[in-house]
Image: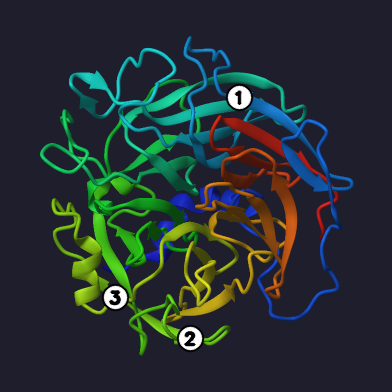
Amino acid sequence: MLLNRRNFIGATGAAFSGLLLNGCTGRSAPLTSAPSSFADYGPLVPDPAGMLDLPSGFSYRLLSSLGNAMTDGCTVPDKADGMGCFSIGNDEIVLIRNHELVPADDAGGVLAKGFGTRDGAIVPGGTTSIVLDATTLEVKREFRSLAGTIRNCSGGITPWGSWLTCEEAPTGPGQRFGEGLAENHGWVFEVPAKATGLIDAVPLKAMGRFNHEAACVDPRTGIVYLSEDRDDSVLYRFVPTTPGRLADGGLLQAMVVEGLSDTRNWTSPDMALGSGHTVSWVDCDDVESPNDDLRSRAAAKGAALVARGEGIHTGTDEIFVCSTNGGQGKLGQILRLVPGTGGEPDQIELFFESQSKDQFNYGDNLTVGPNGHLIVCEDQYTEVVDNHLRGITPDGRAYTLGRLRMQTELAGGCFSPDGKWFFVNAYSPTRTLAITGPWAV
């Protein structure tokens, strides 16, 4: 399925140009291995409020908290996870925020409609939208925008102004954890940035049913890249029949790495740091996967294994994928995929592999800042957690940006369109923060 790029750009060029100019979605300069003089922002200063320590010169504002009254009559639900930022005109921006709720969780109010039910009641997972004044960050409206889904973990923004929210929940009637459910779950849903309330929830089934984590769109082609949170996951891409209209269907494929069946480096350093590998893509079949075996069938066709693919984000002509427990120390990796142009094949490399917990420990959501730095949200799996915001420079050096003082994970990092504010969630109890400071250029 080849894309007619000329027709595609002609139809959606304005939207895709906006994506590249939006600090939430891209970078202002291509990644380079050239060393820079930047080391870090300095030591962290303890937060008197006991929430988030940041370097000197940085500060945060609390925008939204669990239980706050929203403008639709509901209250802010818990388990805030992935998040995207959009400009919607009228000097307004909107944050679309996932809530990784399971059927037994509190929905924060009565849900008027949604995708799935358990024992007749709409299940509580989905998204909320927070509309902000782009200048003052005043919260102007806050409401439920998607309901009836399960464990909306992360997702990704699109160039045409929507949020792809991903269910990390391949369950359903007669399946594990599926008691009382009326529908199969484990899908991607699309939420328009300009939604004003609960949308009609339509699963994008051609994008596959699996333990979805995150998604990102290549603005040159409209191809969607999808990560999967499993120890034996693979990396997927979805080639849409009609770029920009995902509901029209398309072709789901899995990544094959030439000469390498396993990127995890668990038993030996098979994937060397900075070493490029040629990528091809194998077609997936039976993508609605009633047995939740899409990854194993893809691996049987030659797809390379990835250790818990989580955050995924588009930079400039490249895509970064966070592998939460990849690497010889099982502390985390970041893969860098460069889609080919002019008939050249795609390439992938190991961009970063954590060597110590001080570099990063179980990276999860990640984003690419306007200055080209990666910002990674940690999500540790210990009884007592010490989660940080970790930065990684364009030449691959890690530094510490923040330390969460709450006993929960960080998630959903994204930048405002002007690059001034970095938004991030504390998972539970829900807190949504806006951070500003002297960002390195």
Callout 3: SS: loop
Q: How far apart in space, not on screen, are marks 1 and 3 (Cα)? A: 41 Å
Disc 2 residue type (three-letter): Pro
Residue appearing at x 57%, y 27% in the figure: 130
Q: Secondary structure at mark 1?
A: strand
Q: Nearer the viewer, residue 313 or 344?
A: 313
Circles 1 and 2, Cβ within 8 Å, touching? The answer is: no
Q: Is residue 133 visible?
A: no
Please name the residue that numbered disc 2 is placed on.
Answer: 269
Secondary-structure class at tag 2: loop
Lateral position of residue 146 relative to residue 184, left or right? right
Frontmost of labels 2 and 3 is 2
Above/below status of 110 relative to 156: above
Three-letter residue code for mark 1 = Ser
Q: Mark 3 or mark 1, which is nearer the start of the sequence? A: 1
Residue at image position (34%, 33%) is: 102
Horizontal and vertical percent position of residue 35: 78, 79
Mark 1 or 2, which is nearer the eye? 2
Q: Which residue is mark 3?
A: 303
Tell me where residue 437 appears, x and y as whole percent. 83, 46
In space, the residues marked 1 and 2 are separated at their CA atoms by: 43 Å
Residue bearing mark 1: 65
Instruction: Look at label 3 and name its amino acid.
Output: Ala
The quadrant of the rendering that contains the C terminus is: bottom right
How far apart marks 2 and 3 lie (CA) works out to 18 Å
